[in-house]
Image (cartoon, coloured by chain):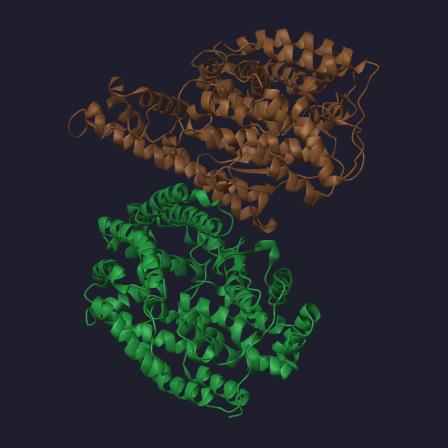
Chain colours: A brown, B green
Amino acid sequence: MSAPRESACGNSACGGGGAGGSGEAHRELMSFQRETEALAQVAGRLGWDRETVMPRGAAAQRAEEVGALEAVLHARRTDPRIGEWLEKIDPGRLDEAGRASLRLIRRSYLRHTKVPGPLAAEIARVTSLAQGIWAQARAAEDFSAFAPTLEEVVALKREEAAALADGGDLYDALLDDYEPGMTAGELERMFAALRPRLVALRERLLGAERQPAPLTGSFDEAGQMALARELARAFGYDFDHGRIDRAVHPFSSGSGLDVRITTRTSPDDPFNCFYSTIHEVGHAAYEQNIDRAFLLSPLGRGVSMGVHESQSRIYENQLGRSRPFTAFLFARMRETFGDFGPADAEAFYASVNRVHPGFIRTEADEVHYNLHILMRFDLERALISGDLPVRDLPGAWDDRFAADFGMTVDRPSNGCLQDVHWSIGLFGYFPTYTLGNVYAGCLYQALRAAVPDLDDQLGRGDTSAATGWLRENLQRFGGLRPPQATIERACGAAPSEAPLLAYLDEKFGALYGG
Amino acid sequence: MSAPRESACGNSACGGGGAGGSGEAHRELMSFQRETEALAQVAGRLGWDRETVMPRGAAAQRAEEVGALEAVLHARRTDPRIGEWLEKIDPGRLDEAGRASLRLIRRSYLRHTKVPGPLAAEIARVTSLAQGIWAQARAAEDFSAFAPTLEEVVALKREEAAALADGGDLYDALLDDYEPGMTAGELERMFAALRPRLVALRERLLGAERQPAPLTGSFDEAGQMALARELARAFGYDFDHGRIDRAVHPFSSGSGLDVRITTRTSPDDPFNCFYSTIHEVGHAAYEQNIDRAFLLSPLGRGVSMGVHESQSRIYENQLGRSRPFTAFLFARMRETFGDFGPADAEAFYASVNRVHPGFIRTEADEVHYNLHILMRFDLERALISGDLPVRDLPGAWDDRFAADFGMTVDRPSNGCLQDVHWSIGLFGYFPTYTLGNVYAGCLYQALRAAVPDLDDQLGRGDTSAATGWLRENLQRFGGLRPPQATIERACGAAPSEAPLLAYLDEKFGALYGG
């Protein structure tokens, strides 16, 4: 695999002659692009700083700093010279990486220039205020306090989608920001196959006689952080190019040589700390393992939200919550915390994977999680198409929740006010969570075939064969291929929901004595 | 005192009519300037990040990030629109703060546009490499390995100075970057008055029969950090708008609502931690206490290096190393570390202020420190004028050191290779350290007159009257007045070296039984 910098001309292969030629235009474009990406990394670092170390009184100044940097980035992303350079460059003279870079640059340029500047500025303004209004409404359990703002956000996003869609489907235009090449129609087909199977599975499991016990007791938070670092290392997180801090919400931030993660601790729930850490390590390892030749190039980031989520999910669930790895974790937790309840590794495995009903997406288990996403996908499609007026959202939410989860939503913070996404204009983002789980299912199937003794290794706390396989077959390629082609390259088959369903049926069927 | 934002028109006072008028030009300029300042704050934060939390493998990517942001800043600072706006604005329509802002913007614009772009880029390139070459040469005790690079830096800085000087003195042109309005001639006069008095004082003190003992023992580093935080709070550091971390070199970073400091600990030298902290709190409190109306405006930063250093020095020395405050510190250290040597507060006070010979500037006491600076000032003036060829620097350094300090330099790392400054192109910077001490002497004299019971308060660990006086009479004004006018406004008289000399004579004469 050759690198974009090598293919960035200066060599004879794509020389293209004197001033104004393809070669020179390509050099200038790639150099301009590299600076833009470096500035985007700076913007990301400001976000990390805000969530981890920023003094609490600095928020107002920080908002201006971020605004100034975002204005610089927006001006660069819509710089008319990009269009001129793109016109001059002959892609036929570039290698695969060079062509892929060019494709991503063109995509970004069209994306950013299609939306009129005043509309982009208005979306930025409204969503920056909307998050605070949403938070207040959620705290007050008052949807009506948020509804006018959400109506404004939906209207602006519809306008943005219309500018992007060129007459096509509005939702597809928004989805394309997060999962290029994916369509709502394709998701609809996939989700239609998932939904009845997941509803049936959850009913069967919750009705089973054997129910695992949740953990009880208290777990020293310094001990949790020490073990979290050990788990990060076990999953291949590179501390020379990253660091772990605590934050209110776990996240991964940055690409290339500086990819930082956060986690959190709670004295009575060590799984939150450990599995948040492993999840974020999945995201971070993807970024850290991209071919160094792609550093600060358009190929030097994870290719889509769905593929990103596939890495965090397979690290967290298929590997981290597997029977063999939980046996390893059980032993390490006993060494760290002493006797904390479960009698043996099997009881511990059942606790880790306990299926339990609940209102909140972020607290959901593997079986319930996708049902949360499926309903959000349908609801946000209806909001964007105009079929669902904002005022009818709570009713639609609660009806769907009752249908799929068998529970009545008791208050808005447990219902349609629980997620921040819509307030900040993220429409088309939710389905990539389930798409990540679907991709993870496919990858896990291929991984098991490629590494026959996977369970033995995981039982020793050794993930190197698994994470090495993901690095070699997926992570290192970064943005070289479109998302679905990236998955297909790794799995040898187009993505399908079938492996995920088979994995869930088998794992939870066995756990609940099915 | 009115604020630059209020004076930034939009109001009728400086309306100036329709498109293209003075009022509109002023609004546009101030808005552009505010974004530039916000981006400069981001650049500062990247520096903080690198020295405190950056993963060690991230340096190469960080260099590109910083380079991209500096390129954006340079383009903004030389943007021709600034010249156009400045031509259109009628300063007569602005209030004092508005005129001061305009003066600083014009100054920066002329400064940045006078130096040709290729020369600025070459200076950035050479100095970024030179620091590493200097560090290697210092480690190898080999001046000749650094000499060619230093020759290159000196030649480039002479070229830059010529571009800035408009036929005037080259050194003055460089000095003006750090202490606007100051001249080498004025410094020469001041330093000529200091040098013989300081040499005589050091000889007298080192020849005295009574010599204070240095501290012995070991001091828990967590205990040092806890006490350092307490000291920072005692000197008015605002943790809501700042934070303290450890770093190899103590520094203060940022302006306005986010001003962070670092310190360091050494198990056998708690004074290093405590007085580095108090010193940096002096810098940080200056930035934190500037009128909030000046936030992100040209007036929203400390006005010069000399005035900045006056704050760090008066916090550290005149207040922090005073007899009454050291009595408070002695009691707190006894509570924290138990019995650690000194029999009583007076013996502790003598230890804190022990005068000791040494080669290294950064380890020097109050009496020796300025002698280090005075020699660097004369040597760098001779380098810039061309009177001193780089190859003759070690000899000139060692001769001067023998004359003023009575000691023979034993190796380059104890001589002319000890400071990083010249390698990174900082010529004209050194004298601002002594200027800061001179200003601190003036301020301390005025402070004592204004707060008659200062010693009683300091003895209780209460600095609020002292730091409050500095805030009210100096810090809050930021860049409103030129540096020397800033000092004069606070002291009621033009700066002079006399108060510093009187302070040193009295303090150390008493300490050494003179």
Q: Is residue A235 left or right of residue A471?
A: right
In the depicted view, which residue is nearer to us: B340 or B114? B340
Q: Is residue B381 above or below residue A51?
A: below
Q: Residue at x 59, y 50 (%)?
A: A55
Q: Is residue B306 above or below residue A490?
A: below
Residue A408 falls in image quadrant? top right
Q: Is residue A159 above or below residue A219?
A: above
Residue B240 falls in image quadrant? bottom right
Q: Farthest residue toward the right?
A: A209
Residue B375: image x %, image y %? 32, 76
Q: Residue at x 74, y 12 (%)?
A: A403
Q: Is residue A81 left or right of residue A57?
A: left
Q: Farthest residue toward the left?
A: A18
Residue A290 falls in image quadrant? top left
Residue A100: image x %, image y %? 36, 21
In the depicted view, which residue is nearer to us: B54 or B57? B57
In the depicted view, which residue is nearer to us: A24 or B209? B209
Q: Is residue B152 left or right of residue A133?
A: left
Is residue A137 among the parts visible in the rendering? no
| Number of residue marks | 0
Q: Is residue A286 above or below residue B186?
A: above
Q: Residue at x 39, y 34 (%)?
A: A296
Q: Is residue B103 left or right of residue B116?
A: right
Residue A404: image x %, image y %? 73, 13
Is residue A49 among the parts visible in the rendering? yes
In the depicted view, which residue is nearer to us: B120 or B354? B354
Residue A67: image x %, image y %? 48, 40
